[in-house]
Amino acid sequence: MFYVFPRPEDIAHYVSIQIGQRFIRNNKVVLGLATSSTMKPVYAQLIEFYRQRPCSLDHVHCFNLDEYIGLKAEHPQSYAAYMQKHLYQHLPFVNDQLYLPCGQHWPTEAQCLEISKKIKSLGGIDLQLLGIGTNGHIGFNEPGTSFHSRTHVVTLSEQTRKDNSRFFTDKNEMPTHAVTLGLKDISEAKEVYLLATGKQKAPIMAQLQQAEITETLPASILKKHPNAFFFVDKDAAEQLDPAQCTDYRFLLERSKSS
Ligand code: GLP
């Protein structure tokens, strides 16, 4: 179901509360985390939530979705550096709670699969956050990726390289490959929130709403997930069919009564 929020900050507010409540509940929780611009307000509000309601986070495990290959963890555009800057350095996590695919060296198939196995050994991902690429990728699973895929190395599409090179001052540094959780890993999460904000995401969200479930549109795998929620702001909702959208206030009502 597609839920329409007025602004990106409103999505961030809702999502940060959902995660923050899992912090407070103190039951083991495995989070699947994403990077890039869409997630920045979510993490900013989650840090604020934690500041106001500090608690132990010993029960929280965080897996990152993906990482570029060929960038050192210290490179400002690595996803390891992103997570450190936007979330991890602000919360009292210790290293063995945080799992980030390592992209510094080309990972072997066995090293990739180790990540998928680790997720399983912790009981699976409870809540997976996702952004979406303008070509419908989730994580770095590009169009055509098998729905049965586990953590693997991908060749980034031209579209993705073009979109993401905006973050690199030296465009030549934009990697050609990445390592990502597979679509099977992602779709096994118990609950999934896919967030899309801004006008540039309006066409792909409309395509996703109308699409069949097909490997040519990786995010469409979520349409058969019983607990996948698509959160869009007004701009990203511009081309959606309103008859197939729900106002975000419905979600607020639902979480108040649960
Ligand atoms: C990258 C990430 C994706 C993310 C996408 C969208 O390609 N691998 O996980 O969803 O960017 O990025 P943004 O939120 O900046 O639009």
Image (tube, rainbow, N blue to C red):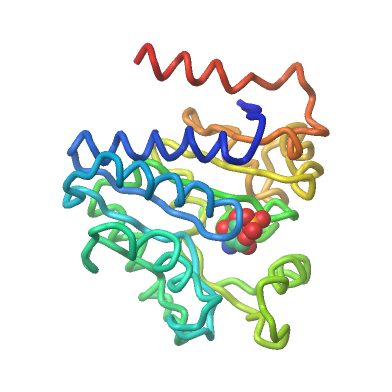
Q: In this view, does 46 lie to the left or right of 187?
A: left
* Residue found 46% across the figure and 37% down from its top: 15
* In this view, 189 is above or below 58: above
User: What is the count of numbered marks?
Assistant: 0
Measuring from the top left, give residue 45's x and y in whole percent: 44, 45
Q: In which quarter of the image is ligand 1?
A: bottom right
* Residue found 51% across the figure and 20% down from its top: 251
Q: In this view, does 149 lie to the left or right of 32?
A: right
Q: In which quadrant will I find the C terminus?
A: top left
Measuring from the top left, give residue 113's x and y in whole percent: 38, 67
Q: In this view, does 140 lie to the left or right of 240?
A: left
Q: Which of 31 and 156 is in front in this view?
A: 31
Q: Which of 99 and 89 is in front in this view?
A: 89
Q: Is residue 76 visible?
A: yes
Measuring from the top left, give residue 114's x and y in whole percent: 32, 68
Measuring from the top left, give residue 30's x and y in whole percent: 30, 48
* In this view, 1 is above or below 199: above
* Residue found 58% across the figure and 60% down from its top: 36
Q: In which quadrant will I find the N terminus?
A: top right
* Residue found 21% across the figure and 65% down from its top: 94
Q: Is residue 140 visible?
A: no
Q: In this view, does 163 lie to the left or right of 181?
A: right
* In this view, 60 is above or below 229: below
